[in-house]
Image (cartoon, grey):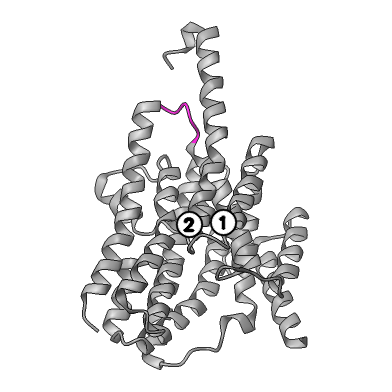
C-alpha cells in the first residue's frame, strides 16, 4: 500500500465505494436499464446517491416522472460543493469543466480536509481518480453479474461513509464559528428530515454558513475602514 | 428502457456542478475574497453525517450505525489514521448486526 497518506485515504474511499457501485449496477439492470445505459449513467452522471435513488424509484414502479425529482434534489448539493471549491478548481476552462464532473461528497470533503492549497488540489484529483475508477468498474461488474456481493450493510459499509466524512470534517472545525456552523447545519438537517423530501435537508444545512459569511464580511469591512491603506488589497 | 431518462439525469447532474462553479467564480469577482466560501462545506458535511447515521428515508433510526459513529468519533478525536477510522466503523456495525 502507498506511503502517501492522501493517496492511501483516497484508495480506501474507492474500495468502499466500489461495493455500492456493484449494488447500483445490479439495481439498474433489474430496473430495466441495459448494461450500456447503466454504465453511461455512472460515467456521465457520476452522482452516487442520486443514481441509486433514480433506479430504485423506477424499479419500485415510480416511473421516470417520479424518479427524476428526488434524484435531482440529491444531486443539487454538488452545486454548493462547486461554489466552495472555486479556489481549488482553478485552471483552464476545459480543465475546470472536466473537474466539475467529479465534484461529489467524497472529492469535496477530501479537498477541504487538507491544510495547503497544493494538498487540496492533489486530494481532489486523487480522490476523483480512485472514486471514478471504483464507481465505474463496480457498476460494470454489477450490471454484468446481475447479482451483487450481498448487501453493503452486511459489511457495515453504510457506517463507513459517515465515519469517513467525520474524519474529513474534523480538521475543518477550526474555531468556534466553524463548530457553530457545523452543529447548526446538523440541527437544520435533522429538523427537516421528517417534513422535507430527501436531499433538501442537506442543501438547507448550507444556510448555517450564512451568519459566518456575513460576520466575516462585516469584520473585513471594519478593518478596511480602520486601515484605509489596506482597503485596496 | 428509452435513453431520455438517462440523458435527463446526466445533463441535470452535470448542470448542477457547472452552475456551482460559475456562481463561485462570480462571487469571487464581486466580493474579491472577502468571504471564505469553504465554510459552506462545514454545515453540509455535518448534515450529511447525521443524515447518513440517524435516518432511514424520512424516519429517525438508531441502529448499528450509531455506535459505529461513536467509535469513529473517539478515533478521530484520538487522531487515529483515516483507514483505521473507516475500518473500525465498518467492523463495529458489521459485528453488531452479526450478533443481533
In the image shown, does B74 or B80 lie closer to the viewer? B74
Q: Is residue A112 visible?
A: no
Which mark sits nearer the N-terminus, 1 or 2? 1
Q: Nearer the viewer, residue A144 or B65?
A: B65
Q: Secondary structure at mark 2?
A: helix
Query: Split into 4 quadrants, where in the image is the C terminus of chain A?
Result: top left
Question: Chain ID for label 1?
Answer: A
For residue A65, side relative to residue A208 (left or right): left
Residue A4: x percent and y percent?
57, 58
| Quadrant holding the N terminus of chain A | bottom right
Q: Which mark is residue A200?
A: 2
As measured in the structure, the alpha-carbon distance from the residue carrying label 1 to the one carrying label 2 is 8 Å
Number of other residues with Cα within 10 Å of mark 2, as a class: few under 14, some 14 to 19, many 20 or more: some
Q: Residue at x 58, y 47 (%)?
A: B43
Tell me what residue is drawn at x 39 percent, y 51 percent. A79
Which residue: 50% across, 72% down? A17
Q: Are marks 1 and 2 on the same chain?
A: yes
The dot on residue A192 is: 1
Q: Chain of mark 2?
A: A
Comparing B99 with A197, the one in front is A197
> Magenta stretch containing residue A34, yes or no?
no
Residue span colored magenta: B32-36
Give how far across and how far down residue A44 sits, in percent.
30, 67
User: Circle 1 sits in a helix, a strand or a loop, which is it?
Assistant: helix
Q: CB under 8 Å between callouts 1 and 2? A: yes
Q: Is residue A156 visible?
A: yes
Residue B36 vertical position relative to residue A205 in the rendered view, above or below? above
Label 1 Cα crowd, 10 Å radius (few <14 / some 14-19 / many 20+): some
Amino acid at each position: 500500500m502507498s506511503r502517501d497518506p492522501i493517496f492511501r485515504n483516497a484508495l480506501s474511499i474507492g474500495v468502499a465505494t466500489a461495493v455500492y457501485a456493484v449494488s447500483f449496477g445490479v439495481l439498474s439492470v433489474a430496473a430495466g436499464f441495459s448494461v450500456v445505459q447503466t454504465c453511461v449513467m455512472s460515467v456521465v452522471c457520476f452522482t452516487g446517491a442520486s443514481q441509486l435513488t433514480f433506479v430504485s424509484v423506477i424499479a419500485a414502479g415510480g416511473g421516470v416522472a417520479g424518479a427524476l425529482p428526488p434524484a435531482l434534489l440529491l444531486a443539487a448539493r454538488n452545486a454548493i460543493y462547486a461554489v466552495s471549491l472555486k479556489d481549488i478548481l482553478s485552471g483552464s476552462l476545459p480543465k475546470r469543466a472536466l473537474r466539475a464532473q467529479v465534484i461529489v461528497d467524497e472529492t469535496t470533503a477530501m479537498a477541504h480536509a487538507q491544510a495547503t492549497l497544493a494538498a487540496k488540489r492533489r486530494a481532489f484529483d486523487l480522490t476523483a481518480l480512485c472514486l471514478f475508477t471504483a464507481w465505474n468498474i463496480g457498476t460494470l461488474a454489477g450490471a454484468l453479474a446481475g447479482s451483487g456481493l450481498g448487501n453493503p450493510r452486511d459489511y457495515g459499509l453504510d457506517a463507513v461513509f459517515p465515519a469517513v466524512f467525520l474524519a474529513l470534517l474534523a480538521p475543518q472545525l477550526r474555531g468556534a464559528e466553524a463548530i457553530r456552523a457545523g452543529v447548526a447545519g446538523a440541527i437544520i438537517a435533522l429538523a427537516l428530515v421528517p417534513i422535507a423530501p430527501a436531499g433538501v435537508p442537506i442543501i438547507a444545512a448550507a444556510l448555517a454558513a450564512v451568519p459566518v459569511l456575513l460576520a466575516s464580511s462585516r469584520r473585513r469591512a471594519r478593518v478596511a475602514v480602520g486601515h484605509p491603506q489596506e482597503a485596496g488589497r | 428502457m428509452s435513453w431520455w431518462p438517462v440523458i435527463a439525469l446526466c445533463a441535470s447532474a452535470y448542470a448542477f456542478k457547472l452552475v456551482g462553479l460559475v456562481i463561485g467564480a462570480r462571487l469571487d469577482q464581486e466580493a474579491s475574497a472577502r468571504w471564505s466560501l469553504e465554510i459552506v462545506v462545514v454545515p453540509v458535511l455535518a448534515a450529511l453525517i447525521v443524515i447518513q447515521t440517524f435516518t432511514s428515508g424520512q424516519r429517525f433510526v438508531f441502529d448499528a450505525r450509531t455506535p459505529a459513529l461513536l467509535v469513529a468519533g473517539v478515533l478521530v478525536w484520538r487522531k487515529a489514521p483515516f483507514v483505521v477510522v473507516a475500518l473500525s466503523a465498518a467492523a463495529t456495525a458489521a459485528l453488531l448486526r452479526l450478533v443481533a
